[in-house]
Image (cartoon, helix red, strand yellow):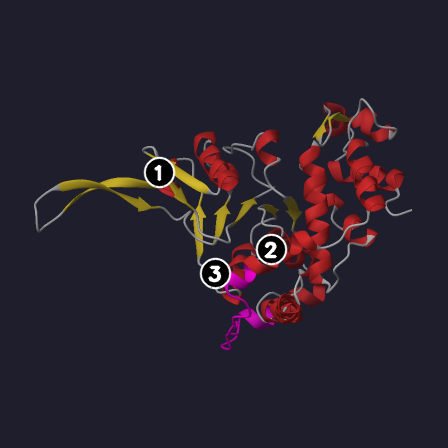
Amino acid sequence: MENTDTKAYEKLLNRLPLLKKEIAKVIVGQEGTVEEVLITLLAAGHCLLEGVPGLAKTLLVKTLSQAMDLQFKRIQFTPDLMPGDILGTEVLEEDHSTGKRFFQFNKGPLFSNMVLADEINRTPPKTQAALLEAMQEKMVTYAGKNYPLPKPFLIIATQNPIEQSGTYPLPEAQMDRFLLYIKLGYPSEQEELQVLEKTTGVIEEKVETVFDSGEILKLQELTRQVHIDRNLLSGINKLVRQSRPDESQVEAVKKYIDWGAGPRAGQSLILCAKARALLHGRFSVLPEDVESLVYPVLRHRLALHFRAEAEGIDSDKVIAEILSAAQIGK
């Protein structure tokens, strides 16, 4: 990079801590979740956010969009939601000067920088597939015409882990399209007390804009330029391959996994590690960047055997053994 480019990027990086500070005005705690969502954005991916009701998932996404001056839309997924409800549809219009009629494509709520797909597992597969296709292609095709989606473009889909009746679980192949699978837990006692104090008074915090959409795109470009050592790259490759029962040396994988993660898991882990390094003001990936992201990268890419459910084993427990055996950076 030229000196002018380097200085411009350094100015952007110096403002990243300000972004977290603005988000913290509204969002109490949840530092790990905030960081993982920001990593998803810098890596130009999409994430799946799982948590029980009332953990401020919608507020988190809305606050992020305000701090980065990004257009935000929330879509409440329901059993009767159709693809046209999120993508858009053609309507018959009339030119009042000539009297001629024509079809005009009216863009749906998906045409936003940041989209909260709330309770994605409550809508039928047809609508889920339309969303996931748009996520992958970064465009919507209607009546033979392509309509590019805005840049940057981030989908944050949520799931409620409690209620499973009347839901449509995402197939494993579609889950793989999400860069990260983030699990949101309950706040600590002190954090919950702060939430109660902040949300029941009259003072409302105002979130200041730290970045605009153009600057976010520059940060996404910079993310891919972050250095990663060849040995670390090799370690990530071996770690992902250890998740596959036919070639793994990890006993838990052989016992509880039907099939492991594909190459996209390695790509995701590398990009996310680069994004985390950038968030921490570094231009080189460290083993700790990789280790901190193994769980959200892999947990939705492992197909558990029925024996795992019977014995109360979830994907995180298997990942812990894979990580222990891989010894990243050692």
Which one is in front in this view, the residue at disc 2 or the one at disc 1? Answer: 2
| Residue 21 percent location from the top left of the image | 63, 71
Q: Under tag 2, what secondary structure? A: helix
What residue is pinned by disc 2?
220
Q: Does the magenta stretch include residue 5?
A: no
Q: In this view, does 326 lie to the left or right of 156?
A: right
Q: Earlier in the sequence, mark 2 or mark 1?
A: 1
Say few, some or many: other residues with alpha carbon within 10 Å of mark 3 (under 14 / 14 to 19 / 20 or more): many
* In-front residue for pair 304/326: 326
| Residue 11 percent location from the top left of the image | 63, 71
What residue is pinned by disc 3?
70
Magenta: main secondary structure equals loop
Q: Does the magenta stretch include residue 209?
A: yes
Q: What span is in magenta?
A: 196-216
Q: Gap between marks 1 and 3, in whole Å?
A: 23 Å
What residue is pinned by disc 1?
84
Q: In this view, does 92 lie to the left or right of 8?
A: left
Q: Gap between marks 2 and 1, in whole Å?
A: 30 Å
**Residue positioned most to the right:** 330
